[in-house]
Amino acid sequence: MSKNRFDLHEERLSTTDEHGHRVYLHPEDVKGPWRNRRKLFYWFLIGLYLILPWIHYKGKQIILLDIPHREFTFFGMTFYAHDAPLFLLVLLAFVFTMGFITSIWGRVWCGWACPQTVFIDTIYRQIEKWVEGKSRQRQKLDASPLSFEKVWKKSLKWTLFLIASLHIAHSFLGYFVGARRLFWITMSPPAEHMTLFFIMLFITGVFLFDFGWFREQFCIIACPYGRLQSVMMDEDSLVVGYDVKRGEPRRGQVERSQEGDCINCYHCVKACPTGIDIRRGTQLECIACTQCIDACDEIMLKVGKETGLIRYDSENGFEGKEKKTIKIRSLIYLAAITAVVSILIYSISQSGNLKATFIRGTGVPYRETTLSDGQKEVLNLYRVRTDFKNKKEIEVFMKIKDNPGVELVTPKNPFTINGGRSKNSIIHFKFSPEILKAGSRSITIQFMDESKTVLLEKEVKLVGPLN
Ligand code: SF4
Ligand code: SF4
């Protein structure tokens, strides 16, 4: 049997040649119902990504991850640095949810919702197609010697890639800086916001490199989720697969009268964005993008055969075995999600309305002075950030619990915090170094409302000389 140039090598990645060099893929376009569904969904996700930073709810950006101020807002709820355990729970819930989804629907995330797939397929590949033409024209251009046409097409393509990357990077930063604030920042000279400017350049560079050039290499060699999928999936998980029973022996291997439904046209291979041949079975490189389903269905319709030679099914389904819809693995994930989400909801409901974060002053950890009577005194400086969630306004009084010889010096006490806002104050603790020598290093600060009800207690560590 003659070897087709699309017969992939058995022992090396389809995206590397015999010298180990990268083979840049130009997957063929396909038309079909899965392609249409994905396109719609991708545009919906991109729209959401671009619009979300501009939506405000309860006076705050709907998602704002303000890292410098350690303030994280999600749909009207604000969390602070001291809510870190809640973030851990959210992360756990996310991991278990991914496990649950993967155990049932396989790599649906990779093919349908991963930013890598969504941006490359919807924006970067479309630009490439628009500038350099269809798959074969692009391959021809890549293989051609340097010419005026090649230079202008490549320059235009990379300029458009850069514009797209800049736009995606700015929207990304909008989640951290605030979209409206970022808009005004972009109107001012970069010199006024050098750090942010360099961060923006860096993120743009990462997107340009990854979406413009690195592409499927990230899925194949760098993505940790891709590596973990085999642990999360079983023979009942949904995969994009090839029906060996129906397709084999494929055309060219046996007499026409004995051959299966696969006409060996390689359309599925040519359309695959990770360059694999799905007829070799489920592979790590497969991102379940459904491109090969539409590619093969197109061919099946042309040759008058039933579609679905490549389709969404489980391994058991392909083998004609009974498919389980309820699986122990999925139930375990579901139980874990329920447990984590319950703890999360309980923790949020129990977390008080008042939050306080003590941040030690930068520079020297403490100052030691000698008083007029010769006694030594240690000074600890803190920035206190207080946040109040629900009420419109509250008057808060701060005091040291049990008063262990430490004096609290604040600019204003009691002080007022507006609901949904935060307040920063600089405070000092004054104490004799003897306190530390006596072994007392922690004090408890109480925050009380007008009726002297304790709303919150926070422990603060004192620092000073030990001898
Ligand atoms: S094998 Fe099919 S589903 Fe998997 S990545 Fe290639 S085209 Fe997408
Ligand atoms: S597209 Fe379908 S018929 Fe063509 S090679 Fe792939 S599986 Fe066979």
Image: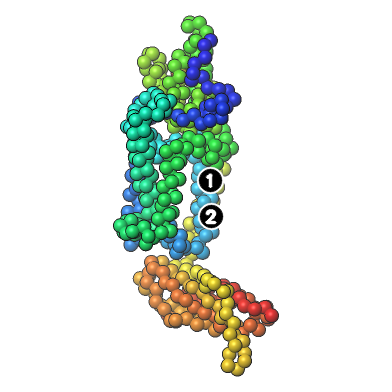
The secondary structure type at the circle numbered 2 is helix
How is colour applied across the structure in the image?
rainbow
Q: Residue 391's image quarter?
A: bottom left
Q: Is residue 228 above or below residue 411?
A: above
Closest to the observer, 325 or 363: 363
Residue carrying label 2: 88
The CA distance from mark 2 to mark 1 is 12 Å
For label 1, being within 8 Å of ligand 1 is answered no
Which badge, 2 or 1, comes first in the chain's sequence? Answer: 2
Badge 1 density bin: few <14, some 14–19, many ≥20, Cα 10 Å: many
Closest to the observer, 93 or 284: 284
Q: Amino acid at mark 2?
A: Leu
For label 2, being within 8 Å of ligand 1 is answered no
Q: Is residue 368 above or below residue 321?
A: below
> Can the viewer see residue 415?
yes
Closest to the observer, 115 or 318: 115
Residue 162 shown left or right of residue 96 in the figure: left
Q: Is residue 417 above or below residue 262?
A: below
Query: Which residue is depicted at the point 53% across and 45% down?
Result: 96
Q: Amino acid at mark 1?
A: Phe
Q: Residue 113's image quarter?
A: top left
Estimate the x, y position of residue 368 in percent, counting from the top left: 59, 82
Estimate the x, y position of residue 354 in percent, counting from the top left: 45, 69
In the image, which is nearer the foreground, mark 2 or mark 1? Answer: 2
Residue carrying label 1: 96
The secondary structure type at the circle numbered 1 is helix
> Can the viewer see residue 104?
no
Estimate the x, y position of residue 4 in percent, counting from the top left: 49, 16
Query: Which residue is depicted at the point 37% across and 17% down?
Result: 301
- Judged from this view, the residue extending furthest toward the bottom is 373
